[in-house]
Amino acid sequence: MRPPLPPFTEATARAKVQAAEDAWNSRDPEKVSLAYSQDTEWRNRNEFLHGREEVKAFLQRKWAKELDYKLKKVLWAFSDNRIAVRFEYEWRNADGQWFRSYGNEMWAFDADGLMRRRYASINDAPISENERRL
């Protein structure tokens, strides 16, 4: 089980979002992947992932490319077993170019509090290092 469990209240939805933010900021693919069901389904930009192992491999690739990653998530809406968030994160590539990535995610959870579905739309904007906020 991965509390808080659905059905969500505003307080438990906010706690779930904060837990996700904290986990992703750890940049630990193993730790992050444990929040997802074994049969999780993802859409992340133009990638479609199926299962926790694909998620873990994706996260390893992501954080090898997105250096000095820092994320902020904000609750947008919730009901029953679903949560919507908006987010932004900053990172730099190997050449030193900084980016701010913006997006929205829709999450659906199983009864054990594991994320069964994650659909993310993300856009990247190049920024200078002095424009960083996170």
Image (tube, helix red, strand yellow):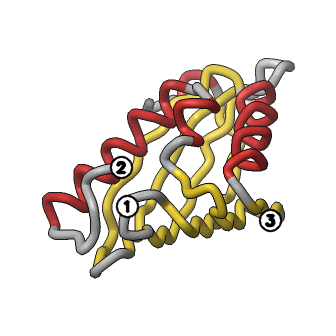
Q: Counting residues from the N terminus, which is met first, the one under dot 1 or under dot 3?
A: 3
Q: Are marks 1 and 3 in contact (CB under 8 Å)?
A: no
- Secondary structure beneath label 3: strand
Q: Which residue is mark 1?
A: 112
Q: Amino acid at mark 3?
A: Phe
- Secondary structure beneath label 2: loop
Q: Counting residues from the N terminus, which is met first, the one under dot 2 or under dot 3?
A: 2
Position of 99 relative to 114 (above/below): above
Position of 110 relative to 24 (above/below): below
| Residue at 31% in and 44% down | 18
Q: Which residue is mark 3?
A: 48
User: In terms of depth relative to the viewer, which is nearer, 38 or 92?
Assistant: 38
Query: Is residue 17 found left or right of 52 in the rendered image?
Result: left
Number of numbered callouts drawn: 3
What whole-number distance in Å separates the C-alpha atoms at marks 1 and 3? 23 Å
Q: Which disc number belongs to residue 2?
A: 2
Give the foreground label among 1 and 3. Answer: 1
Position of 94 relative to 5 (above/below): above
- What crowding class fits label 1: few (fewer than 14 Cα within 10 Å), some (14-19), or many (20 or more)? some
Give the foreground label among 2 and 3. Answer: 2
Q: Counting residues from the N terminus, which is met first, the one under dot 1 or under dot 2?
A: 2
Q: Amino acid at mark 2?
A: Arg
Rendered-image quadrant of the C terminus:
top left
What whole-number distance in Å separates the C-alpha atoms at marks 2 and 3? 24 Å
